[in-house]
Amino acid sequence: MRIDYGEILFVGPCNFKCFYCLGHEMHESTKCNTLDIHFQEWPNFGKWLYKLRNNSVQTIYLSSTNSEPLLYKYLSELIDFLQDVGFKVGIRTNASKDLLVYDKCKEEISLSLQSLNPNTFEKITGVPLTFDFLKNLNQLTNPNVRVSIVVNRYNKTEIFDMLHQLKSFNLRYVQLRQCYKYYDDADIQLDIDAFNDVVSKLKSFPVKGNFNESIIYDVDGLPVSVWETVFKKESISSSNYWTNGVITDNNLLVEGYEDERK
């Protein structure tokens, strides 16, 4: 069995309420709160780590489908534990909390950026903008940092301004993504059109290369990856552990979780 990396998905509330959040698609069993439970008490956690070891997996990413890793009470201890037992740890976070915790990670740090404009940010996340994304980004010392932006109906006119501001940071790359949203929404076409419009404008920039299923453009020296196959993820394979004890090997997280739950 091929596994490229492991992913820990924290189950619990989030401090954002993004309208496109994957958590909207998840079963009610992911609405419980495990953010105060020590990882030594997580069900099936040891079993999952053993599985990764048996498949020579070296990297674990800390992530979520409906929460935020930085809200986990024992995050710093968990990072130390995983790295002490030989895993390289990366994190995918909304960058709203103390960056000193996840700067400890030896693998890629991925920061989600919704908007730098307070009005747009609140439309997307449902909460006020209370932190300075660029200031937080500037605190990081890890050289392996990417910024991920979900292009949507609200931030579509701000994308190139955000890219311009990100150029001053030593980022590995910026990733532009589609909305990951299946449930019925009469306005979803607005998000599809927004993404396609941004991609059409990017095509005026030179192609820098390819990464997995993504084309990378050189936007005035900034590598910008366009992930048009967000619903496939065919070129990589992960084993996924939810902190409520569910384990799946399906790269499509909602589908995999539902299959395992049933």
Image (cartoon, rainbow, N blue to C red):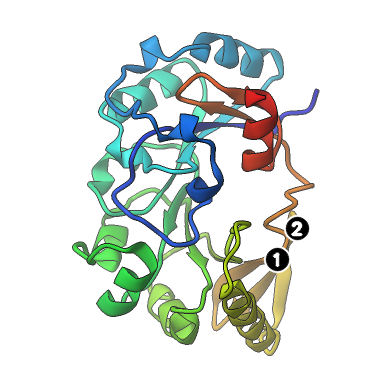
In percent of the image, x 62 and y 32: which residue is there? 257
Callout 1 amino acid: Glu
Where 5 falls versus 193 (above or below)? above
Disc nearer the start of the sequence (2/1): 2
Left or right of residue 148: residue 36: left
In percent of the image, x 65 and y 75: which residue is there? 217
| Closer to the camera in the image, 185 or 238 | 185
Occupied quadrant, residue 105: top left
Category of crowding for the residue at label 2, using alpha-carbon neighbours closer than 10 angstroms: few (below 14), some (14–19), many (at least 20) = some
**How many numbered marks are there?**
2
Category of crowding for the residue at label 1, using alpha-carbon neighbours closer than 10 angstroms: few (below 14), some (14–19), many (at least 20) = some
Which residue in the protein does label 2 denote?
213
Left or right of residue 119: residue 189: right
Where 55 falls versus 138 (above or below)? above
Say what secondary structure mark 2 lies in.
Answer: loop
Question: Residue 132 in the image: x percent, y percent?
Answer: 23, 65
Q: Which mark is residue 8?
A: none
Where 144 falls versus 27 (above or below)? below
Q: Which mark is residue 228?
A: 1
Where 259 falls versus 203 (above or below)? above
Q: Quadrant of the N terminus?
A: top right
Say what secondary structure mark 1 lies in.
Answer: loop
Nearer the viewer's eye, disc 2 or disc 1?
1
Question: Residue 206 in the image: x percent, y percent?
Answer: 70, 83
Q: Are marks 2 and 1 in contact (CB under 8 Å)?
A: yes
Q: CA distance from mark 2 to mark 1?
A: 8 Å
Callout 2 amino acid: Glu
